[in-house]
Amino acid sequence: MASIDLQNITKIYRDAKRKRDLLAIDDVSLSVQPNEFLCLLGSSGCGKSTLLNMIAGFEKPTTGTVTVGGKPVGGPGADRGMVFQQANLMPWLPVWENVAFHLRLKGWRKADRRSAAQEYIDMVGLRGFENHYPAELSGGMSQRVGIARALLLNPQVILMDEPFAALDAQTKMDMQEELVAIWQKQRCTVVFVTHSVDEALVLGTRVAVMTSRPGRIRELIDLDLPRPRDITSPRFNDHKRHILNLIREEGMQQRSVAAA
Amino acid sequence: MTALTKSWERLAVPLFILAAWEVFSRSGVLPQALLPAPSVVLHTWADWITGFDESSQANSGRWLADALSSALRVAAGYAIAAVSGVALGIAIGWWRWVERTVEPTIQMLRPVPPVSWIPLAIIWFGIANKPAIFLVFLGAFFPILMNTIHGVKTADRNLIRAASMMGATEQQLLRHVVFPAALPSIFAGLRIGIGAAWMLTVTAEMVAVKSGLGYVLWDSYYFLRYDLVLAAMASIGLLGFATDGAIKLLMSAALHWQHGSTLQSREG
């Protein structure tokens, strides 16, 4: 089981057009334990996706280190599964080929790929759609394919970048439930980026609330609410109120800084 | 809509033009020899193909050989252009250093009309198939190249990210993501290229080769056989139409995944 360690991460973007530096992430340290379901919660532009992309290996921190399972992250790789905001399926491949894309890269034969894909297609509830093409799928179904594709890597770490943000409310709730069930079954470490307080509270074992510009961890909140989570329970609402207050304070500080 | 009315839609315009032309030609405003009626052209054409009454004189019954030698030149030059254009296009689109080193030269050669290479082509390759194949290559290469570059450059970055997250090497990215993603553009280039290929075969045959449809066309002009000139033109048009149709079929087979998501797929 792999843990994830972020140590003293800063990220500075060089704004070449305006000739100045932009501090996007300011000294973030965070460690994610094996089996944990960590939600990175913050408004848009707070650097939560940048942090996720660093764990994925798409971006490098300006200073600080990122390690997964004790090894520093050198670049993207199949030891971590990633689910993107858009499903990012290959439009020229049917569902099962998309799910088994990793095995195609590894040179598996077609019949073997096909049978290996089936387990994960069933897991995300897409039986019967194996031969559909991405253009024929709804948004929710596409995201399921993306999740199945990440699960097939059998990764110890799954990174999710607002995967349900574009789905309607009902589909989103179904998918959240299924994701929790899959996570409980697969026993992997999940880092889930979201801007929705409800989503973070429904999914996470821990929520990291981020401030924006520069991105810092404002507070880490442990959630020991029983599952399936009841979004109308008093304890759920206590957490929600607390987080919303944090965000409101943050917004007021931002405005006073902007006014000064 | 029934199949019958659909084919009627396709045929209405050509049939009207042919009928008007027949009437105009028979009216005697122009001498018949300068604008032969479609019926005369068809008659000569039929003899050119079958040799039934020698009305096309020396060409009688030789159409298939003429068409075949033109088609083979097209096929050879086009195949070389397709393979090299797609390969170089992917390299230019993918690697910055290839783009920097190769593209300026290519962009300087591109505006030079292929026809202007004829003098050099004759000196290099003599009077035979080779200069024609060279010209066909030049004509088809640039549209295929340009469209391939465009296809690679507009490939969705997120698909490349998704594939590299699944452990794809650079070579695998090119083969399993970039190439299929560029395929719609590549086919656009291939279709423009096949038109250029026919144009340049015929041009080369008029000047540098002593066989093929273009040669018959130009030779018939010297003998004022405008019926043969027109039959040759029609033959080239039909063959070009047929090869484009073949590429379109290949395209819809290769891009079947686009069905239902693009305007093109509405044709069914």
Image (spheres, rainbow, N blue to C red):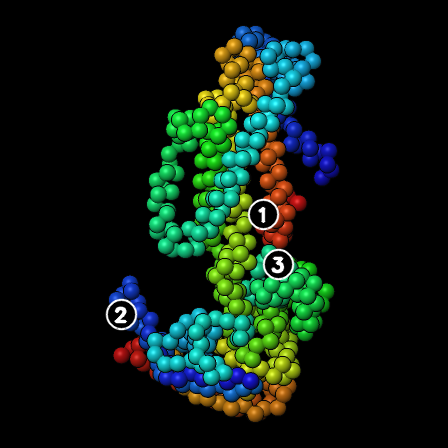
Please name the residue that numbered disc 3 is placed on: A93
Q: In front: mark 1 or mark 3?
A: 3
Going 54% across and 49% down the picture, which residue do you hit? B184
Mark 2 highlights which residue?
A: A20
Q: Earlier in the sequence, mark 3 or mark 2?
A: 2
Residue in front for this viewpoint, B186 or B90: B90
Given the image, what chain letter belongs to the residue carrying mark 1? B
Read off the chain for label 2. A
Q: Mark 3 touching mark 2, by CB under 8 A?
A: no
Marks 1/3: CA–CA distance: 20 Å
Instruction: Give the quadrant of residue A205.
Output: bottom right
Image coordinates of residue A103 in percent, x first then y, are 61, 66
Which residue type carries mark 2?
Arg
Of all chains, the one bearing label 3 is: A
Q: Quadrant of residue A105?
A: bottom right
Of circles 1 and 2, the one toward us is 2
* Residue B53 place in picture, x, y as percent: 68, 10
User: Could you tell me which secondary element the residue under label 1 belongs to?
Assistant: helix
Q: Residues within 10 Å of mark 3 (few under 14, many from 20)?
A: some
A187 relative to A162, above or below: below
Q: Where residue A241 appears, x then y in whole percent?
A: 50, 88
Query: Which mark is drawn over residue B77?
Result: none
What's the amino acid at mark 3? Answer: Leu
Question: Percent x, y for residue B93?
Answer: 43, 52
Q: Is residue A119 left or right of residue B149?
A: right
